[in-house]
Amino acid sequence: MPIPSRSRVFLAVVLAGVALGGCGKSAKIPTEKFIYTTSADCASGGKVSTADCDKAIETALVEHDKLAIKYATMADCDKMEGPERCERVAERHYRPRLMSFLFVVNEKVVATPLYAVQVSVNRSATLFRDAGGTTYDWERTEGITFSRAAIRKAEGFTPIKHRRS
């Protein structure tokens, strides 16, 4: 049996390397963003399973407990957040009421708690905000899909300008 020449061995090694170069690498999963109000709303969007929606929301609720602004009185909370946007926490604190969740979906699912926009920030847009103050407007924020339930919730807690047909 003839011994392969060096060039043939080299060519075989290079071709094997090229052929195997893609092994183990998966295609990058695009990141999608959604705003949902509940686990059922999330699951009905068709992008995330109910179990993943539940798990992401459970984690977001822990974040809500840790990061939501706390006020000493309901009057202080109402003044900053707006009427009917606050809830009592324990016996001596008030915080903004959780309104919805920003879901970031790629290899994993992460939800972030969202609140109605603070009255002092903007009185005439349909906005949500996170604990850090980033706002999400269903009429202007690109790259995020808002569920119908999230839009209705924003409209219910924030005065809006009605568009002309």
Image (spheres, grey):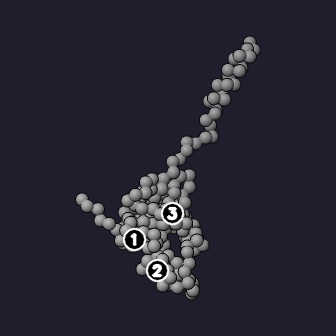
Residue located at (48% from left, 53% from top): 32
x%, y% of residue 56?
54, 63
Q: CA distance from mark 1 to mark 2?
A: 13 Å
Of marks 1 and 2, which one's residue comes earlier in the chain?
Answer: 2
Locate residue 57 relative to residue 138 in the image: left or right. Answer: right
Return the disc, 1 or 3, that comes first in the chain's sequence: 1
Residue closest to the far left: 165
Q: Nearer the viewer, mark 1 or mark 3?
A: 1
Q: Residues within 10 Å of mark 3 (few under 14, many from 20)?
A: few
Secondary structure category for the residue under label 3:
loop
Quarter of the rendering occupied by the C terminus: bottom left
At x 34%, y 68%, the residue is 160
Residue 134 marker = 3
- CA distance separating discs 3 and 2: 20 Å
Q: What residue type is disc 1 on?
A: Arg
The residue labelled by disc 2 is 79
Q: Nearer the viewer, residue 144 or 141?
A: 141
Instruction: Identify the residue at horizontal 42%, vertical 62% (top origin).
Output: 137
**Residue 30 in view in this figure:** yes
**Amino acid found under the numbered disc labelled 3:** Thr
Quadrant housing the N terminus: top right
Secondary structure at numbered mark 1:
loop
Q: Nearer the viewer, residue 146 or 5?
A: 146
Q: Earlier in the sequence, mark 3 or mark 2?
A: 2
Instruction: Give percent across and percent down for residue 49.
Output: 48, 59
